[in-house]
Image (cartoon, helix red, strand yellow):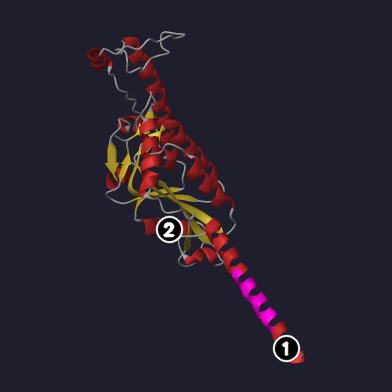
């Protein structure tokens, strides 16, 4: 009888350890999903370099800024590499990322690494980083503003369609595709674009320690290769992503090869693209919205 009780007790103890082990594995999985990294180094102690990615058309600053804030608050992260591959986007979102980079860079170094492109609004976002690193063939610059919208009033006339517009002022329906563009519309929109262009030029001059006249000479919307951008002082050095990581480690005082971490993102399916990205991109072109965007 005593042996039976002993076996029962051992079995219970064994089962308890199994459940404890399963619970620990589940807890580790949850932690990994929440704070996971691109490599196993995310679980190791020591100082790290965080990687934040700015990719594609910039329609919102929310995700990038959230990651920048997250890594700015982590004591084990000593520097951040902002990896950019974007032709820019809407003005407000580009400026919000710019302001966040400026704020975070005062807490710990932010190094920008340009992949294929950091053009227009994406270049704007990079201006208050500690350093901008680009490949020799990366596309950089496109300092300018664009505003375009469709005008289909002639097509509507042929189709026999007409829109009735009730408005509170002469310029309230400026940019409407259902009526011809007036000279007053053009002057109005040009004033908006010119003001936003001045803001861009001022940001480049301040961020890159250039005079306003120097920036105005190249702020006609054209892009430059990494080599050209270096000669114009639009970037700091030619280098790869690995070079940017090494620079981040050096300026933050990390000894040896830096460990990289980044926020783990779920893989996106074709359905995500069809029902999320495409509608957002189409939506961004409805109405009149100036953009820091490379065409």
- Looking at the image, tell me whether mark 2 or mark 1 is earlier in sequence order: 1
Q: Nearer the viewer, mark 2 or mark 1?
A: 1
| Location of residue 224 with respect to 9 vertically, above or below | above
Image quadrant where residue 175 sits: top left
Identified at 38% across, 46% down, the residue is: 271
Q: CA distance from mark 2 to mark 1?
A: 62 Å
Expressed as whole percent of the image width and height from the top left, the position of residue 43 reads 54, 65
Instruction: Tell me where residue 155 appears, x and y as whole percent.
Output: 24, 17
The residue labelled by disc 2 is 245
| 270 on left or right of 65 | left
| Helix, strand or loop under label 2 | helix
Closest to the observer, 214 or 244: 244
- Inspect this view and state whether residue 234 appears: no
Name the chief secondary structure element in magenta: helix
The x, y position of residue 227, in whole percent, is 28, 47
Residue assigned mark 1 = 4
The magenta region covers 10-22
């Amino acid at each position: 009888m005593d042996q039976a009780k002993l076996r029962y007790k051992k079995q219970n103890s064994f089962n308890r350890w199994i459940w404890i082990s399963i619970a620990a594995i589940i807890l580790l999985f949850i932690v990994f999903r929440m704070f996971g990294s691109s490599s196993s180094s995310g679980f190791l102690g020591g100082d790290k370099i965080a990687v934040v990615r700015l990719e594609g058309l910039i329609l919102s600053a929310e995700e990038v800024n959230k990651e920048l804030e997250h890594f700015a608050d982590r004591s084990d992260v000593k520097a951040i590499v902002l990896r950019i591959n974007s032709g820019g986007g809407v003005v407000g979102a580009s400026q919000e990322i710019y302001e966040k980079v400026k704020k975070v860079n005062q807490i710990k170094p932010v190094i920008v690494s340009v992949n294929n492109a950091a053009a227009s609004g994406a270049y704007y976002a990079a201006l208050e980083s500690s350093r901008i690193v680009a490949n020799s063939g990366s596309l950089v610059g496109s300092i300018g503003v664009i505003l375009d919208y469709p005008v289909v009033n002639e097509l509507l006339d042929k189709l026999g369609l007409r829109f009735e517009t009730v408005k509170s002022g002469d310029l309230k329906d400026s940019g409407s595709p259902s009526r011809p563009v007036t000279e007053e519309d053009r002057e109005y929109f040009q004033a908006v674009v010119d003001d936003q262009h001045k803001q861009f030029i001022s940001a480049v001059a301040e961020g890159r320690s250039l005079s306003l006249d120097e920036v105005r000479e190249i702020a006609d919307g054209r892009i430059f290769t990494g080599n050209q951008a270096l000669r114009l002082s639009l970037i700091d050095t030619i280098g790869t992503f690995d070079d940017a990581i090494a620079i981040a480690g050096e300026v933050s005082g990390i000894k040896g090869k830096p460990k990289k971490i980044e926020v783990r993102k779920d893989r996106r399916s074709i359905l995500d693209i069809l029902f999320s990205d495409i509608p957002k991109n189409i939506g961004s072109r409805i109405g009149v919205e100036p953009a820091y965007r490379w065409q």
